[in-house]
C-alpha cells in the first residue's frame, strides 16, 4: 500500500452532510458503515486481534460499494516507489481507509455531487487532504 491517493477533503464533508440528512435508507446505512469502519480502524490500531474483523468487513463493503474496487483499480495502476513491506495491521488499516472513501464516493455519486471516483481525487502534488497511506 505504498501508493498515495489524495482526496478532496471537502467532499468528505459534503457526503457527511448528505448522510446526516438521512434522506434515504441507503444514506443511513452508509453512515452506519462509515462509523463502524472508523471504529474498527481504531480497534485494529490498538489491538491486532481485530485484523480478521477488518478483512471480513472489507469483503462485505466491496460487495455493497463498487466504488471501492474503482479506487483499488486506480491504486493498482499507479507506480510504487516504496520498498518497505507493511505489516498486516498497516495493510488492513489502509484498506479500510480506502473503503471509507469508497462509501463517501458512493453517497456523492448517488446524490449527483460527482460523476465518478476521479472527481474526488486531488493531484498528489497538493498534499493537503486525507490520504490512504
Image: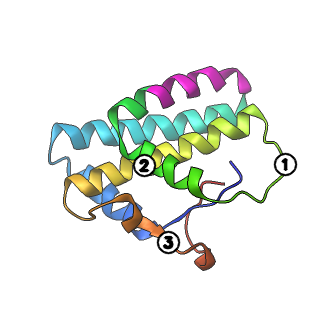
In magenta stretch: residue 56: yes
**In front here: 85 or 21?**
85
Q: Quote the CA–CA distance across marks 1 and 3.
A: 25 Å
At numbered mark 2, what does the secondary structure look like: helix, strand or loop? helix
On-image quarter of the C terminus: bottom right
Residue 103 placement (x, y as % from top left): 38, 46
Q: Tell me the number on the disc at residue 84.
A: 1
Between disc 3 and disc 2, the foreground one is 2
Residue appearing at x 42%, y 42% in the figure = 34
In magenta stretch: residue 109: no
Does residue 129 appear to the left or right of 79 in the view shown? left
Q: Disc 3 designates what residue?
A: 122
Q: In the rendered view, would you say 88 is above or below 5?
A: above
Label tally: 3
Does residue 119 appear to the left or right of 1 in the view shown? left
Q: In the rendered view, would you say 64 is above or below 5?
A: above
Residue 76 placement (x, y as % from top left): 58, 50
Q: Tell me the number on the disc at residue 70.
A: 2
Q: Which residues are magenta?
A: 48-59
At numbered mark 3, what does the secondary structure look like: helix, strand or loop? strand
Residue appearing at x 31%, y 49% in the figure = 106
Residue appearing at x 43%, y 40% in the figure = 35
The earlier-in-sequence mark between 1 and 3 is 1
Q: Specify few, some or many for label 1: CA neighbours under 10 Å numbering under 14, 14-19, or 20 or more.
A: few
Residue 128 placement (x, y as % from top left): 58, 74
Q: Quote the CA–CA distance across marks 3 and 2.
A: 15 Å
Amino acid at each position: 500500500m505504498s501508493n498515495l491517493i489524495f482526496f478532496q477533503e471537502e467532499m468528505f464533508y459534503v457526503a457527511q452532510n448528505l448522510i446526516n440528512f438521512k434522506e434515504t435508507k441507503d444514506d443511513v446505512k452508509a453512515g452506519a458503515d462509515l462509523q463502524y469502519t472508523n471504529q474498527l480502524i481504531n480497534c485494529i490500531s490498538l489491538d491486532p486481534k481485530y485484523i480478521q474483523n477488518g478483512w471480513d468487513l472489507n469483503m462485505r463493503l466491496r460487495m455493497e460499494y463498487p466504488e471501492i474496487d474503482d479506487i483499488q483499480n486506480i491504486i493498482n495502476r499507479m507506480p510504487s516507489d516504496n520498498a518497505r513491506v507493511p505489516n498486516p495491521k498497516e495493510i488492513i488499516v489502509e484498506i479500510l481507509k480506502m473503503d471509507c472513501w469508497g462509501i463517501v464516493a458512493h453517497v456523492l455519486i448517488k446524490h449527483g455531487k460527482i460523476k465518478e471516483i476521479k472527481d474526488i481525487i486531488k493531484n498528489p502534488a497538493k498534499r493537503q487532504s486525507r490520504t490512504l497511506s
